[in-house]
Image: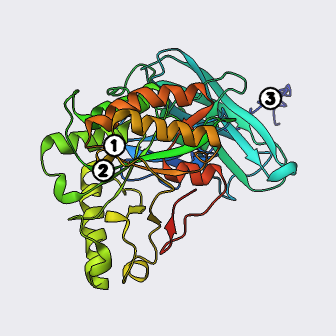
Amino acid sequence: MPVKTNVTPVSQSTTTKAVTTTTATTTTKPVEKIYINNSFDSDTENWSGRGNASVAASSDSYYTGKSLYVSGRTAEWNGAAIKLGSDLIPGQTYSFSAAVMQQSGNAASIQMSLQQGEGDDASYTTIANTSCKSGEWTKLENLSFTIPENSGDMLLYIETTQGSGDLMDFYIDNVLVASEDTKSSVVTGQGHVGEAPATTPGVQAGKKLCAISFDDGAVGNASTDTSMRIINALKNNNMTATFFYVSDWTTTSGHYEEVKYAYKCGMEIANHSKTHPSLGSLSSSQVRSEWEQCNSKLRSIIGTEPSHLMRLPFLDGGGQVKSALYDIPLISCAIDTGDWNKATKDQIVNKIKEAANNGTLEGAIVLCHETYATTAAAMEEVLPWLAQKGYQNVNISDMAKAHGKTLAGGQIHTRA
């Protein structure tokens, strides 16, 4: 008989193990985008002067390679500007930076600003501001600037702080506009600082203007040379002038240095022909060649395009002159000092003073020559007198611009 076995049931328990699922979150850094990256190593890279300011690529001082030199400022808002493209969007945030440098002898506040729109509807916003020591490259930077949601085209510009009175020339380099938090490689205190350029006088508001101008250079760059005495007399009285050079008379290193110095001091470098002939007796092609060869020589000396004004040798604008130089303003004079005809120092001074007193000097182009000791002595006496009488002598182009006049090509001008 089968044996019955008592089997005790085994209790079974089921254990469920919790599984924790971890989701890895990866933060992707926004792709860095460069909108503007200007180092000015070849040209001005679409930057232009704002207001009365002029801009030019320069190798005198630079953070790297070359820089943009900003000169001729007559108000704080005058400076260097570039139009921003439509890829920069109002309401979005970007990084803005630049290297800036000035050599005024004192610290100055330089700022980067944004203009949106034009005219009465324009709005202006400061992007970044820094105190810039004289003679030191300084970083100007805002890593997180949100463009205001204003309408109109956008203009980025660099200026000095409003109300500061800082009208010095300055340099900019390594301008960078990029995605937010894009840091500039500029380090304050680094970069090359060259010799400070001579201050270029601008046209002063409220002054009566005249344009005493000088023919027949170059003479030389010795301190006692008549040319240098005249240039320094102008410089010492915060004035400029137009100097008309004959290229065949500009052949030595001393001549070249005079022209460079005149240009550095803000003088207008202009054309007085290659050989100083009476142009009215020449053919059209000969007239054109006289101008072109002189222009080419002056360009090679100063490293940029000289003024396209031409003082007519012997004041002769007859024959084929006007048609051959249809695009060149031809300069004669309203007042001839007669220095070329052995006028004494006192006679030159008295002729200018008489014109100032009777009102005919204002707006007049005055004929002088840089080659006479009598002329140099006359300028050393009469320029301070003119300044006391509320006059400023300026170059011919600046006087025309200040008076709202156009110096038309192929026409003879005696006033501006």
Location of residue 305 with respect to 95 vertically, above or below:
below
Q: Earlier in the sequence, mark 3 or mark 1?
A: 3
Question: In what quadrant of the picture does the C terminus appear?
Answer: bottom right
Numbered label attached to residue 15: 3
The one nearer the camera, 93 or 52, is 52
Residue at 63% x, 49% y is: 402
Mark 3 nearby-residue class (10 Å; few <14, some 14–19, many ≥20)? few
Q: Are marks 3 and 1 in contact (CB under 8 Å)?
A: no
Q: Amino acid at mark 2?
A: Asn
Numbered label attached to residue 279: none
Label 3 residue SS: loop
Q: Are marks 1 and 2 in contact (CB under 8 Å)?
A: yes
Question: In what quadrant of the picture does the N terminus appear?
Answer: top right
Residue at 72% x, 23% y is: 163
Residue at 58% x, 24% y is: 388
Residue 68 shows in this picture:
yes
Label 2 residue SS: helix
Label 1 residue SS: loop
Q: Amino acid at mark 1?
A: Ala
Which residue does the numbered mark 2 point to in the structure image?
341
Numbered label attached to residue 343: 1
The one nearer the camera, 332 or 271, is 332
Location of residue 15 with respect to 39 vertically, above or below:
above
How much space separates mark 1 and mark 2, taking CA atoms?
6 Å
